[in-house]
Image (cartoon, rainbow, N blue to C red):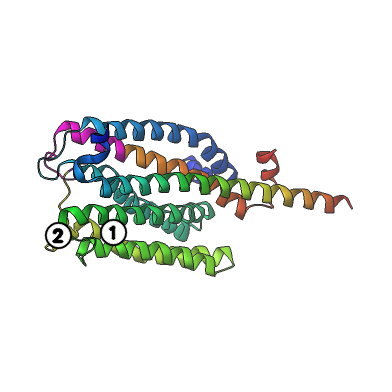
Amino acid sequence: MSEFFAMGGYAAFLWPSYLITFVAIIANIVSARRAHAAARSEALRRLDRDSSEAQS
Amino acid sequence: MGTNWAWFHRFGSPPHVYRLAGLLTPWFAWPAALSILAALYGGLVLAPPDYQQGEGFRILYVHAPSAWLSVMIYAVMATAAGIGLIWRMKVAHAAAASCAGIGAWFTVVSLVTGMLWGKPMWGTYWVWDPRLTAQLVLLFLYLGYIGLRSGIDDVGRADRASAVLALVGVVNIPIIRYSVEWWNSIHQAPSVMKMEKPSMPMEMLVPLLLMFLGFTLYFAAVMLVRLRAEILRRERSASWIREALR
């Protein structure tokens, strides 16, 4: 197992490469979902405001 | 208006695209996750060490797919921007805008993983090599595109100005692609994306191809979520939203 993590002496270059790729993959998922959730609640707020203005 | 154009108009219709993007996202996301996990196992465990680079060559499995994404996303972004300019299609501009952030991220990943691979193999993190320099220019194109958009308040003007920038930047794409052939580059020539037989044993090649597939599907899924956000931001007063969101 420790042999696997040592990666033949390349561990210091290989694992950071995989780490930054992993970070990019997760960060893009999180930020896309956040952007959609934010746009969605903003749109709903705006619809509520418009309909309450129409009633008064 | 002939029926041949019906599909085109459906693709220009924000409610239709919003709904379709929502339906399609899981069909890209889950196969992407499965391909990437399988490719990780294949690349890190099953593939034999390289006869020259030993275990170090395994950086290939994150470097090459990231570099592929960085260029492919730019091509998608410029195509969408061009369609938006020519046919004045708002959804196409929204699609272009959803690409930029993802593309910039994977350009950074390709540069950093390339540096981490270059250090043990070439003895240096960075050289002003044609391939590396063109990839750095790609990052600046993405950042310029994002900066230009955020600097213009009016969405229509931001769309048109950033689309022109995206199209001008297309000249960089063949430069990245052919830099290793046109100039005497330190960067190795592609070992998969070439016409002849790939110069790699199957146990190495299959995880790499799976990784390319997984990254491409991943991009489609993330881009569709961003596209939905972009459509909502642009169309928030439209009446279809009430129906779509409740």
- Chain of the residue that carries numbered disc 1 in the rendered image: B
Find the residue positioned furthest to the front.
A2
Q: In the image, is B241 to the left or to the right of B82?
A: right
Q: Specify start and end residues of the magenta stretch as a single range.
A: B192-212
Q: Which mark is residue B186?
A: 2
Which image quadrant is residue B49 in?
A: top left
Q: Mark 1 points at which residue?
A: B173
Answer above or below: position of B3 versus A24: above
Q: Is mark 1 on a helix, strand or loop?
A: helix
Q: Residue B150 carries which label?
A: none
Please name the residue shown 36% across and 62% down the image. B139
Find the residue positioned furthest to the right.
A56
In space, the residues marked 1 and 2 are separated at their CA atoms by 19 Å
**Residue B164 showing in the rendered view:** no
Under mark 2, the amino acid is: Ile
Please name the residue shown 41% across and 66% down the image. B165
Q: In the image, is B15 to the left or to the right of B171?
A: right
Under mark 1, the amino acid is: Ile
Pointers 1 and 2 in contact (CB under 8 A)? no
Quadrant assignment for the C terminus of chain B: top right
Nearer to the camera, B165 or A38: A38
Q: What element carries label 2?
A: loop
In the image, residue B76 lies at what x, y percent?
38, 51
- Chain of the residue that carries numbered disc 2 in the rendered image: B
Please name the residue shown 50% across and 42% down the image. B6
